[in-house]
Image: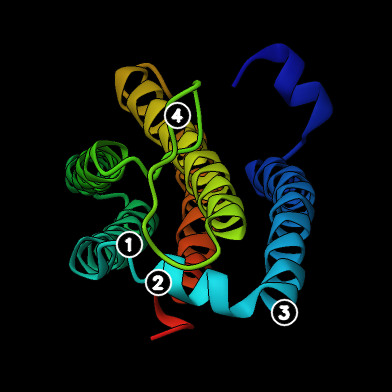
Amino acid sequence: MSGTESVAFDTPQRERRADNFAMWVFIGSEAMLFGAIFLVFLVAHIDFGPAFAAASKHLSLPLGTLNTAVLITSSFTMALAHRLALQRRWRATVWALAATSALGICFLAVKGIEYGKEIGEGLAPLLGLPFRYAGPDPTHAEFFFGLYFAMTSLHALHLIGGIVVIAGMVALWRTASPANRLRRVVAVGLYWHFVDIIWVFMFPVLYLINR
């Protein structure tokens, strides 16, 4: 622990509590962001229910289900990393963090495949691409897909942030003290579980509510 850290925090426990508090504040702000987007989607769903129902059936339920399983598994490996860090089993903690990051990358790869399928079918109203949709009420179906891409891409950006942070933790692992290792695992674990929970809500809203 550096001299600056020892002045600000007289014990590692206080430093860890401060990190957790800061992370909860950040998570709270991000929850409000996602909450606003969910609110827009749900209000639009009430107004344009039939169009949203028809449009959602063009999403790939198998790929969405696969990604849900991948993220739930990543929450398990992150929780395992936390438990191993509490036991000071550092090598195993690094492996658990690496597995969590790998599962996150797997999620992004599957999402990329799904995006490619949707773009190929002309269902992506972005980047000036023509929107080709043969179902009912194409105007509001386009609104559905606009919200879908906004919600899922924002979630993907948060997931990428988590992967980058984990990579940074692993890169600096040997130079960090045990107390710093533990508090970083706890903080990034809170963030990772938040990102997973967002998807757990997003999946049924986008893929299942109309099926």
170 to the left or right of 208: left
> Going from the N terminus, do you reach mark 3 or mark 4 first?
3
> Which residue is painted at 76% across and 61% down in the image?
40
Q: Alpha-carbon neighbours of circle 3 within 10 Å: few (<14), some, or many (≥20)?
A: few
> Which residue is painted at 26% across and 44% down in the image?
121
Residue pointed to by mark 3: 46
- Identify the amino acid type marked 3: Ile
Q: State the image quarter where residue 4 is shown.
A: top right
**Disc 4 secondary structure class:** helix
Q: Alpha-carbon neighbours of circle 2 within 10 Å: few (<14), some, or many (≥20)?
A: many
> Going from the N terminus, do you reach mark 3 or mark 2 first?
3
Give the spatial CA distance, label 2 vs label 4.
29 Å
**Image marks 2 and 1: residues in contact by CB distance under 8 Å:** yes
Mark linked to residue 165: 4
Residue pointed to by mark 2: 207
Give the spatial CA distance, label 1 vs label 4.
30 Å
The residue mark sitting in front, 1 or 4, is 1
> Going from the N terminus, do you reach mark 3 or mark 1 first?
3
Mark linked to residue 59: 1
**Disc 2 secondary structure class:** helix
Give the spatial CA distance, label 3 vs label 1.
19 Å
> Going from the N terminus, do you reach mark 1 or mark 4 first?
1
Quadrant of the frame with the N terminus: top right
Nearer to the camera, 159 or 204:
204
Q: State the image quarter where residue 174 is shown.
A: top left
